[in-house]
Amino acid sequence: MFSRMFGKKADATPSPNAQIQKLGDTLEVIEKREEVLNKKIDQEVAKAREATKKGNKTVALTHLKRKKQYEEQANKLAAQRQNIEVMQMKMEEAAMNMETLKAQKEGAKAIQNMYGKTTIDKVDADMDKVREVMENANDISEAIAQPMGVDDLLTDELEEEFAQLEQEQIDKEILGIEGQGMPSVPSGKIGDSAISTTQPAVADEDEEALRQLEAELGA
C-alpha cells in the first residue's frame, strides 16, 4: 500500500515478449484510429462536394477545413505507426539475438562440462598412448601369427621334395624329346643308298641268278 502511495517503482522489468506485445497492441489502436479518420475524411469530402453543387461556398470550405484537420491527424498517426513498427521489429530482432546468444552460451557451457579439465596437451598425451598401445597390439598379433620352428623344418623339406619333383619332370620332358624327334642315320654309303633307291627290282633277280651259277660251277 505504501509503495502505491509514495509512487515506488515496480522492481519487475517487463520481459521482451511482453514489451513486443505491448507495441503490437499500440499499433492495433493506431490502425483503428486511422480507419476512423479516413472515414471522416471521406465524409467531409462528400459533404464539400454536395455543398459545392448547391452553390454554398461557405459550407463547402468548412468541410474542406475539417478534412484538412483530419488529414493532419492521420498523417501524424501514420508517422507514429511507422515508428512503432520499426521499434517492434528492432525489439523482435534483439530478442532473437539474445535467445541465440543464450543458446550459444549454454551450448558452450555444456561442451566445457563434457570436456571438464581436459586440455590439448592431455589429449595429445592420451593419443600418443593410444597409438603406442595399437602398435604394441599389432606387434603382438604379428608375433603370434609367425610360424613355429617345426614349421620351418617342414617347409625346408617340402621345398627340397618339390625341387626333386620338378627336376624329374624336366628329365622326363628331355627324354621324351630325344625319343621322338631325332632322325636315324643311314647305315650304308650315300652312293649305295642312292643307287639302291634308283635300281629297279630286276637287279635283285640278276644277283640271285649269278649266285646259282657260281654254286653249280663249284659243284
Image (tube, rainbow, N blue to C red):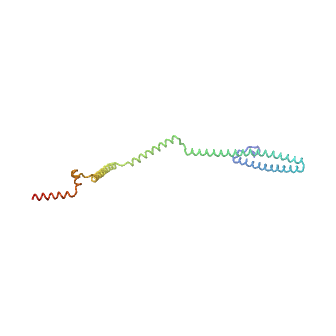
In the image, is 174 to the left or to the right of 94?
Answer: left
Which x, y percent locates residue 201? 21, 58
Which x, y percent locates residue 116? 55, 44
In the image, is 218 to the left or to the right of 165?
Answer: left
> Residue 67 versus residue 147: which sits nearer the camera?
67
Q: How many numbered discs, if any?
A: 0
In the image, is 104 to the left or to the right of 194?
Answer: right
**Where on the picture, by quarter, is residue 73?**
top right
Which quadrant is the C terminus positioned in? bottom left
Q: Pick out the residue farthest to the top.
A: 121
> Residue 82 versus residue 210: which sits nearer the camera?
210
**Where on the picture, by quarter, is residue 139?**
top left
> Residue 17 versus residue 65: which sits nearer the camera?
65
Which x, y percent locates residue 186? 23, 52
Which x, y percent locates residue 77? 78, 46
